[in-house]
Each structure stands twice: as structure tokens, then as C-alpha cells.
Image (cartoon, helix red, strand yellow):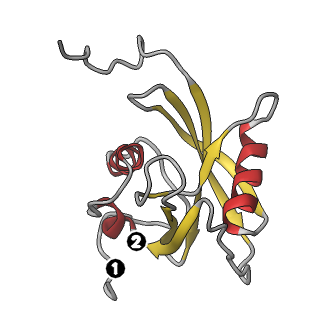
């Protein structure tokens, strides 16, 4: 017997998460998840679970500090979604200092990249929820500062 199709109205929320969308020179900060966490080896935006009594904003700050070793400054919630496995995700635009030196927590992050949306959207290792986020962005369900047309490839690749 197969599972019923995913329906956000009937799929119960099992967990809440917050994700940081950080832009630098028309590229997005993306991590490859370590082999020690769920969905090992997948590419995704940095972020993670929201602790009890923690706000989305505070979760973004904590998760970026834990994963990337830097302070981030969440600006605004730009989108929300629910995964097929019941995680409700809050997507926040956030900034880091221009001279911030990213230092990954190898328990959670294998490596990081700065990728243009066209590069990321086409990546085979992209976490499905992140693909949905990029598709929603491409469909203009929200905008992100720093991009005039995020799905036109950059001239320099």
C-alpha cells in the first residue's frame, strides 16, 4: 500500500526549522551537510531546528553561529513552507559582515559554497525543500534583495 500524496493541509507539523538566505555578490551561501546529520551530503541553505521557546529570528542567529562560526543578522522572513515529512520551514533573509571569516562546524557541515541561483537550482544534490524554495522564488512568490533577475545566469558563470 502506498502513502497518500503530500498535502500541507493534512500533513501534521512534526518539527519547525529556520533557514538563512545570505547573499554576497549575487551568490547564495550554501552548505553541504556532513555525513553525521540527516540528509548527509545534500546541499542546502544553512539553518536548522527551532528550539522550544525560541523565535525563528533567534534560531537563525544560533544556527548560523553553530554551523558557520559567524554572527548573522536576520532581516525579514521571506517565505515559509512545509516539507513532505512534516517540517515547517521559515526562510529568512540575513546578512553577515562583509569581512566575516566563515569557519564550518565539521559535525554539521562538510563544506560551503557561494552559488548563483541558476547553479544551485540545477544541482543534483540539492535538498528537495531547497529546490521548492528556489522554484517558488523563480515563480516570483517573493523577492530577495541583491538580485534583479536571479534566474538569468551571470556573465562570469
Mark found first going from the N terminus, 2 or 1 = 2
Quadrant containing the C terminus is: bottom left
The residue depicted at 41 percent of the width and 43 percent of the height is 129
Residue closer to the observer: 71 or 68: 68
Q: Residues within 10 Å of mark 1 (few under 14, many from 20)?
A: some
Residue 60 in percent (x, y) is at 70, 49
- The answer to whether marks 2 and 1 mark residues whose Cβ atoms lie closer than 8 Å is yes
The answer to whether residue 14 is above or below residue 111 is: above
Residue 98 in percent (x, y) is at 71, 80
Q: Residues within 10 Å of mark 2 (few under 14, many from 20)?
A: many
Q: Residue furthest bottom?
A: 156
The residue depicted at 26 percent of the width and 60 percent of the height is 124
Q: Quadrant of residue 52?
A: top right
The reply, left or right, for residue 116 in relation to residue 19 is left
The residue depicted at 40 percent of the width and 57 percent of the height is 42
The residue depicted at 63 percent of the width and 62 percent of the height is 107
Q: Quadrant of residue 9?
A: top left
Q: Residue furthest left?
A: 1
Residue 142 in percent (x, y) is at 47, 45
**Which is more foreground, mark 2 or mark 1?**
2
Quickly name the residue at label 1. 154
The answer to whether residue 79 is above or below residue 4 is: below
Quickly name the residue at label 2. 116
Q: Residue furthest right?
A: 53
The answer to whether residue 45 is above or below residue 49 is: below
Quadrant containing the N terminus is: top left
The reply, left or right, for residue 127 in relation to residue 86 is left
Residue closer to the observer: 12 or 41: 41
**What is the distance, in whole Å, between disc 2 and disc 1 at their CAs?**
8 Å
Amino acid at each position: 500500500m502506498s502513502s497518500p500524496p503530500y498535502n500541507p493541509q493534512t500533513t501534521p507539523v512534526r518539527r519547525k526549522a529556520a533557514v538563512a538566505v545570505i547573499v554576497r555578490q549575487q551568490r547564495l551561501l550554501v552548505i553541504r551537510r556532513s555525513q553525521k546529520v540527516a540528509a548527509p551530503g545534500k546541499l542546502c541553505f544553512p539553518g536548522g531546528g527551532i528550539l522550544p521557546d525560541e523565535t525563528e529570528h533567534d534560531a537563525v542567529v544560533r544556527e548560523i553561529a553553530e554551523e558557520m562560526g559567524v554572527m548573522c543578522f536576520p532581516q525579514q522572513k521571506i517565505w515559509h513552507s512545509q516539507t513532505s515529512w512534516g517540517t515547517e520551514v521559515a526562510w529568512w533573509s540575513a546578512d553577515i559582515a562583509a569581512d566575516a571569516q566563515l569557519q564550518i562546524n565539521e559535525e554539521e557541515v562538510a563544506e560551503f559554497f557561494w552559488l548563483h541561483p541558476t547553479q544551485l537550482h540545477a544541482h543534483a544534490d540539492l535538498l528537495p525543500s531547497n529546490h521548492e524554495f528556489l522554484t517558488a522564488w523563480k515563480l516570483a512568490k517573493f523577492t530577495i534583495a541583491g538580485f534583479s533577475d536571479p534566474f538569468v545566469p551571470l556573465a562570469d558563470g
